Image (spheres, grey):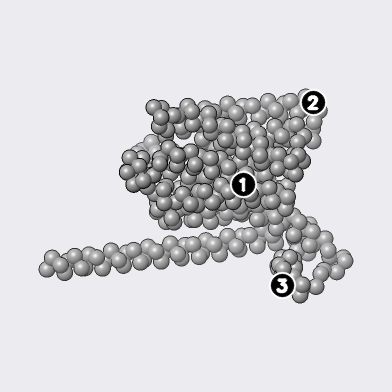
């Protein structure tokens, strides 16, 4: 009888695992399909003045013409319609690609910081990385150095100042040779607030020096903007995104072990302090890449990991890819709303409008002790 009961229990558990895996796979398939659909809608829909000439067929023809194998078989547009290719390929396609990548990167950084600090309210904005990266990016704009180093001066400065901010926070939170997660978060808020206060100072300096043309670029950094995202920006984004994203992707198993507690992870062979440094550097890298080309886009790194955790659970082998897809979806939706409904309203404003209520909900759950 006992063996029969064990067998039934084992069968039920196996069926539960199979159903859970099926739900996760279904979610990944559906969410990836939604992301692709939103990507295409972002390329198709836009300002009312050109909506009648940019049709789904012209979008597919334009994209197909730039695919090596297929492109040679698609005839070019007539002379009177060549502006359509410029709108689609030079403006909308890189903006849609860049927006999706930025959403993926911010979501990955959010997962990493929340898991590393074991705090659901941690994200790149809260721990000071965004403010530090924005400071470096704004400084390059103010000094007129955006064209230096083949255009890489801005992301490099953003990474350097973002990493410097994280280093200060790390030193503040390091007690007895170990990193205190609670102090790290509090230190990040303090350092981020201080660095954030320096950015309006730079804006005032640009105003007093008569550099009005640079004020718009600085404001775009403060509010978060995809309007000027082109192929050059995507090219600058990719090296940092690939490097930092690969490190975080390879850290999925270690993040699972760290979630069980540092002592347990250490017993299972994780060099916890070295791993913390690696995640902090990778998180700073991807955040700096996003901030350097799009400015500060708040709440994505906070809300998306939480939503993904509710759908696929805490296992980082599922949580990280789910957050990446949802991050891309959030940015594509926000950009679509910005262009189609809100007359190019800064995307950081849109994510804040939707993300702030969710942050309040998370904070309330944290106070109630129900996280």
Q: Residue furthest left?
A: 1
Q: x, y percentage for residue 279?
A: 49, 42
Identify the residue shown where x is 67% and y is 44%: 293
Contact? badges 3 and 1 (CB < 8 Å): no
The N terminus sits in image quarter: bottom left
Front residue of this view, candidates 48 and 58: 58
Q: x, y percentage for residue 94?
A: 70, 55
First-in-chain label (1 vs 2): 2
Element marked by disc 1: helix
Identify the residue shown where x is 41% and y is 51%: 253
Element marked by disc 2: loop
Which label was assigned to residue 209? 2
Contact? badges 1 and 2 (CB < 8 Å): no
Q: Mark 3 points at which residue?
A: 70
Front residue of this view, candidates 79 and 250: 250
Q: Whole-Å distance between the Cαs marked 3 and 1?
A: 30 Å
Q: Whole-Å distance between the Cαs marked 1 and 2?
A: 33 Å
Q: x, y percentage for residue 198?
A: 64, 27
Element marked by disc 3: helix
The C terminus sits in image quarter: top left
* 357 displayed left or right of 270: right
Q: Whole-Å distance between the Cαs marked 3 and 2?
A: 52 Å
Contact? badges 3 and 2 (CB < 8 Å): no
Which label was assigned to residue 240? 1
Quarter holding residue 270: top left
Q: x, y percentage for residue 275?
A: 45, 42
Quarter holding residue 182: top left
Q: Residues within 10 Å of mark 1 (few under 14, many from 20)?
A: many
Q: Which of marks 3 and 1 is in front?
A: 1
First-in-chain label (3 vs 1): 3
Q: Is residue 306 above or below residue 172?
A: below
* 225 displayed left or right of 246: right
């Amino acid at each position: 009888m006992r063996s029969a009961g064990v067998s039934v229990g084992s069968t039920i558990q196996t069926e539960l695992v199979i159903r859970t895996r099926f739900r996760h796979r279904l979610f990944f398939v559906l969410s990836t399909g939604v992301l692709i659909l939103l990507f295409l809608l972002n390329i198709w829909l836009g300002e009312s003045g050109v909506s009648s000439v940019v049709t789904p067929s012209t979008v597919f023809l334009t994209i197909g013409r730039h695919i090596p194998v297929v492109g040679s078989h698609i005839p070019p547009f007539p002379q009177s319609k060549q502006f359509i290719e410029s709108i689609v390929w030079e403006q909308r396609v890189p903006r849609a690609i860049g927006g999706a990548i930025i959403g993926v990167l911010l979501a990955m950084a959010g997962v990493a910081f929340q898991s590393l600090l074991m705090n659901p309210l941690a994200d790149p904005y809260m721990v000071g990385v965004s403010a530090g990266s924005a400071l470096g990016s704004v400084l390059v704009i103010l000094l007129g150095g955006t064209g230096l180093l083949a255009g890489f001066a801005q992301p490099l400065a953003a990474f350097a100042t973002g990493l410097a901010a994280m280093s200060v926070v790390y030193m503040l939170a390091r007690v007895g040779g170990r990193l205190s997660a609670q102090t790290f978060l509090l230190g990040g808020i303090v350092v981020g607030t201080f660095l954030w206060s320096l950015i309006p100072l730079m804006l005032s300096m640009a105003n007093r020096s008569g550099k009005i043309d640079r004020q718009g670029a600085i404001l775009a950094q403060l509010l978060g903007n995809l309007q000027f995202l082109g192929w050059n920006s995507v090219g600058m984004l990719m090296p940092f995104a690939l490097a930092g994203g690969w490190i975080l992707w390879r850290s999925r198993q270690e993040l699972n072990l760290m979630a069980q507690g540092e002592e347990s992870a250490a017993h299972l062979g994780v060099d916890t302090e070295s791993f913390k440094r690696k995640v902090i550097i990778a998180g700073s890298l991807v955040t700096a890449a996003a901030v350097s080309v799009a400015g500060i886009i708040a709440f994505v790194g906070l809300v998306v990991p939480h939503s993904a955790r509710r759908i696929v659970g805490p296992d980082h082998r599922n949580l990280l890819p789910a957050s990446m897809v949802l991050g891309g979806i959030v940015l594509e939706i926000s950009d679509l709303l910005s262009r189609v409904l809100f007359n190019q309203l800064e995307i950081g404003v849109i994510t804040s409008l939707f993300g702030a209520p969710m942050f309040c909900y998370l904070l309330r759950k944290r106070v109630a002790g129900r996280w």
